[in-house]
Image (cartoon, rainbow, N blue to C red):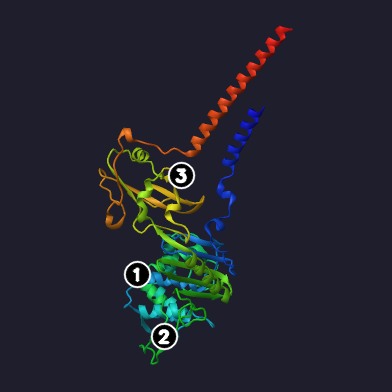
Amino acid sequence: MKLRRFFTILITTAILFGAFPASALCDDNDALNLPDFPALVSRNIVLMDADSGEVLFGSNADLKCAPASTTKLMTALLTVENCALTDTVVFSQNAVDSIEYGDANASISPGEELTVEQSLYCLILRSANEVSYGLAEHTGKTLSAFASMMNSRAQELGATGTHFSNASGLTDEFHYTTPYDMALIARACFNNKTLMRIISYSDLYTIGPTNKSNFTRYYRHRYQMLPGGDYAYRYSCGGKTGYTDAAGNCLVSFAQKDDLRLICVVMNSTDEGRYTDTIALFDYYFNNYHKIYLEDYETGITSGSVDILELMNRIDSTADISIGFKSGAYLLVPDNVRMPQLTGIVTYSDNPAYSGEEGGFACISYFYDNINVGSATIFVSTKDSGDSLPGQNGVPMLSLKHPEPAESFRYINIWYILGSVLALIFIAGLIILFLRHKKRRSSRGNKRLRF
């Protein structure tokens, strides 16, 4: 009975370990040694890593919202991508008549001429509605054609929950986006140096006399996180405000500290809340996270994570291979996490769960104390294919020889080993129980013969 009880306890323990992984028994924040997450006022918000596109925080990220004047970021992006800054914009009567009482404007007259660059400063700093109309006509010939350009560009950026009907953000049932989609649009803006020079402008901008005006115009950014603003933030790279009764207070913000670039989108919030929430999220990630560049740890790909023979079989090649990460690939992890503490698990591209970059052969996910802290695409090339890795200068960073048969190996899961051992012990236990039972029956038979 003691032996039977022992095996019952042993098997039960094994089942419990399989059913309740360690990650379910600890709190992620405690394990990662992170401070409490900030309390936020806004309900529709996204914080995105501008370089990777990873959403670091989201609340109602896919909720359709009226974007108000944050729309003008798409208007500015398309203008910069399709026009020269020195081009001349001639403002039509329709453009001037498009503004209503209370709309932000730059006091443009019909037939007035500004350069594209001057118009963009009016668009971003002043949020002038007639200027957005004029840029739309200049870039797309008509407002409807420009709206089609906006929607096509949104689709290209992956903003599938977005539809624009005008260039300024005026309320319309067919004019909407989501916090996530707006972050994707903002990411394209952040990667455009020409546009960011305007978006981040914190000085007084001046437009002198024109063909229709004898006075000089002066503009300051309405965005309040730049130097001199009510919510001045040392890492701010600019942003765009927006407000209508339907949209509430909206804000798109850009910030950078060292090598970490972040985008925050807030929609339908309060005037103060959109700024305080943005700053709280920026500070949380700037103060508690850092980048680990994977190029420095490429040899770790083969440290129990990638089976070289498995790679060869999947590539169907006997040639030597090279594997590595794309140049600049990184993980964004809490400050106390270091690469040697991470465990990598590989998912190959023929697995439906794999969702790596185009051209990638496999995806490696990294875990810290059973908590997923990021993933990266593994690229593979062979000598006979002539392919090169997208690494630094196109040079493969880690070359591996095809293993000889005697040196071949396969990665063995420790749980398989444990399961096999338990199975053997269980079988051995059954044999011992059987033999003991048989011995007892034989002993009882002998006693009966004596009587």
Residue 82 marker: 1
Q: CA distance from mark 3 to mark 1?
A: 39 Å
Check whether the beta carbons of the residues at disc 1 and disc 2 lie within 8 A of each other: no
Q: Earlier in the sequence, mark 1 or mark 2?
A: 1
User: Which amino acid does the dot numbered 1 rest on?
Assistant: Asn
Dot 2 crowding, Cα within 10 Å, few <14, some 14–19, many 20+: few
Q: Which residue in the protein does label 3 denote?
A: 352
Compared to residue 52, the image places residue 226 above or below, namely: below
Which of 65/330 is in front? 330
The quadrant of the picture occupied by the C terminus is: top right
Residue 6: where, in percent of width, then height?
63, 32
Which image quarter: residue 153? bottom left
Give the mark, 3 or 1, whose residue is nearer the N terminus.
Answer: 1
Look at mark 2 in the image and give the residue it sits on: 204
Relative to 283, does residue 320 appear above or below in the rendering? above
Q: Residue at x 30, y 57 (%)?
A: 392
SS assignment at label 2: loop
Q: Is residue 2 left or right of residue 162?
A: right
